[in-house]
Image (cartoon, helix red, strand yellow):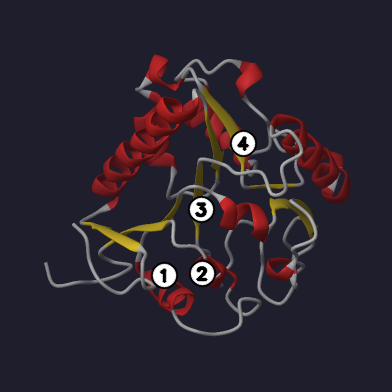
């Protein structure tokens, strides 16, 4: 169902539980990718990690050959090897790429194992090559989330990362015992033709409300999406309880 509460002009879709959220998100991902292929012959999508999108990725994988003209990018990555359990790439490979038999030449892994700065330079170069040097590159679909601290992608509060508009991909050192990260910068996230922000559970209620409220994006980086009219928030009713 659709509801109220998201920023003006944004779509809000509320699911009853995790299973319905996965179904709705997978269907919307497939719809957006098919539309991009129909319009331009190819679709570029950037995937996020975390537990919430995993169910949708598994359902999307069942589309098989319908994904043949999709090019896969990542929103962010930890500086760990691709086989590490905390790798966003590794999770998506197990949930989506391998089950759907995606060709390797359609997959652009963020090489966080190079280190944050080198990984960011490498990914910026990959994007520049694929998009003919367009600044910023325009992805057809971005799958994003919101952390309990209000971060999105690997744009963490208090780091100034959300304010970086001088690069397409940046290195982030969040501190607090967290690994360094490679992440798409705000200009790329805001340029996407469609962004789906997925959130599930009561722990996401406060960060979602903060993301929708006025304020400093460096305090709540997910506020950056207020600057784009092409955002759909897909959440479960525990995160945004509504009268149903």
The residue carrying mark 4 is 73
Q: In the image, is 185 to the left or to the right of 140?
A: right
Image quarter for residue 222? bottom right
Question: Dots 4 and 2: beta carbons under 8 Å?
Answer: no
Gap in Å between the C-alphas at discs 3 and 2? 14 Å
The residue carrying mark 1 is 203
Q: Position of residue 108 (x, y in %)?
A: 67, 30
Q: Position of residue 240 (x, y in %)?
A: 30, 70
Task: Kindly give the residue lying farthest to the bottom in the view shown.
Answer: 215
Q: Nearer the viewer, residue 239 or 44?
A: 44
Q: In the image, is 211 to the left or to the right of 31?
A: right
Q: Secondary structure at mark 4?
A: strand
The residue carrying mark 2 is 148
- Binning the other alpha carbons within 10 Å of mark 2 as few (below 14), some (14 to 19) or many (20 upward) gives some
Question: Dots 3 and 4: beta carbons under 8 Å?
Answer: no
Question: Dots 1 and 2: beta carbons under 8 Å?
Answer: yes
Q: State which tag comes first along the sequence, 1 or 2.
A: 2
The residue carrying mark 3 is 144
Task: Kindly give the residue lying farthest to the right in the view shown.
Answer: 118
Q: Position of residue 117 (x, y in %)?
A: 87, 50
């Amino acid at each position: 169902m659709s509801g109220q509460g998201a920023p003006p002009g944004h779509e809000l879709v509320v699911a009853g539980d995790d299973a319905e959220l996965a179904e709705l998100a997978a269907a919307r991902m497939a719809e957006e990718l098919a539309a991009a292929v129909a319009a331009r012959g190819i679709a570029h999508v950037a995937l996020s990690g975390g537990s919430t999108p995993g169910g949708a990725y598994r359902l999307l994988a069942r589309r098989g050959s319908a994904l043949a003209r999709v090019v896969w990018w990542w929103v962010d990555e930890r500086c760990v090897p691709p086989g590490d359990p905390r790798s966003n790439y590794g999770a998506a490979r197990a949930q989506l790429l391998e089950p759907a038999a995606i060709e390797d030449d359609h997959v652009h892994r963020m090489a966080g194992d190079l280190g944050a700065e080198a990984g960011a330079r490498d990914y910026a170069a990959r994007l520049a090559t694929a998009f003919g040097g367009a600044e910023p590159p325009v992805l057809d679909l971005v799958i994003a989330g919101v952390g309990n601290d209000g971060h999105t992608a690997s744009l963490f509060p208090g780091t100034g990362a959300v304010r970086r508009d001088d690069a397409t991909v940046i290195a982030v050192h969040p501190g607090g015992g967290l690994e360094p990260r490679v992440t798409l910068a705000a200009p790329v996230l805001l340029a996407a033709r469609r962004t789906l922000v997925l959130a599930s559970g009561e722990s996401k209620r406060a960060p979602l409300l903060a993301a929708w409220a006025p304020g400093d994006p460096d305090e709540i980086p997910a506020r950056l999406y207020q600057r784009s009219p092409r955002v759909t928030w897909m959440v479960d009713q525990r995160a945004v309880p509504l009268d149903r």
